[in-house]
Image (cartoon, rainbow, N blue to C red):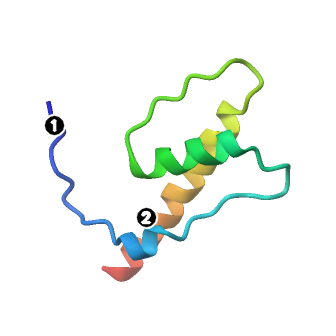
Amino acid sequence: MQPPPMKLKVDMLEAKHWIYPLNQPKRDYQFNIVKHCLFDNTLVALPTGLGKTFIAGVVMLNCEFLAALLAYKL
């Protein structure tokens, strides 16, 4: 079953710009998971100590950033 369509269209040109903190070592799997979470519905299941909280924090940071960007453009 398909989810209902979004009411707002995502500006894919602007969506290419998102924030990823580099104040700790970049782990490729975390970076890829964050990227997928920002553009698709995603369920993250990782063992303890692999950064689920970090991933959630980065996604929330970017959702706040993108929401502010959308509000500015409206």
Where is the N terminus found, in terms of image quarters?
top left
Residue at point 67%, 58% (across, down): 20
Return the x and y of residue 46 as percentages of the image width and height. Answer: 63, 23
71 lies left or right of 50? left
Looking at the rendered image, the disc whose residue lies closer to the viewer, 1 or 2, is 1
10 Å neighbourhood of mark 1: few (<14), some, or many (≥20)? few
- Name the residue carrying label 1: 2
Q: Quadrant of the C terminus?
A: bottom left
Locate residue 43 relative to residue 71 in the image: left or right: right
Expressed as whole percent of the image width and height from the top left, the position of residue 36 reads 48, 46
Q: Count numbered badges in the picture.
A: 2
Q: Position of residue 2 (x, y in %)?
A: 16, 37
Q: Is residue 26 above or below residue 47?
A: below
Residue drawn at (43%, 35%) of the image: 42
Dot 2 crowding, Cα within 10 Å, few <14, some 14–19, many 20+:
few
Q: Could you say which quadrant of the image residue 67 lies in?
A: bottom left
Give the percent coordinates (x, y) of residue 13.
41, 76
Residue at the right extreme of this rendering: 24
Q: Residue flagged by tag 1: what amino acid is it?
A: Gln
Q: What residue is shown with label 2?
A: 67
Q: Earlier in the sequence, mark 1 or mark 2?
A: 1
- Residue furthest to the top in view is 47
Is label 2 in a helix, a strand or a loop? Answer: helix
Note whether 62 is above or below 42 in the view shown.
Answer: below
Residue at x 38% of width, y 39% of height: 41
Q: Which mark is residue 46?
A: none
From this viewpoint, which residue is outermost toward the bottom?
73
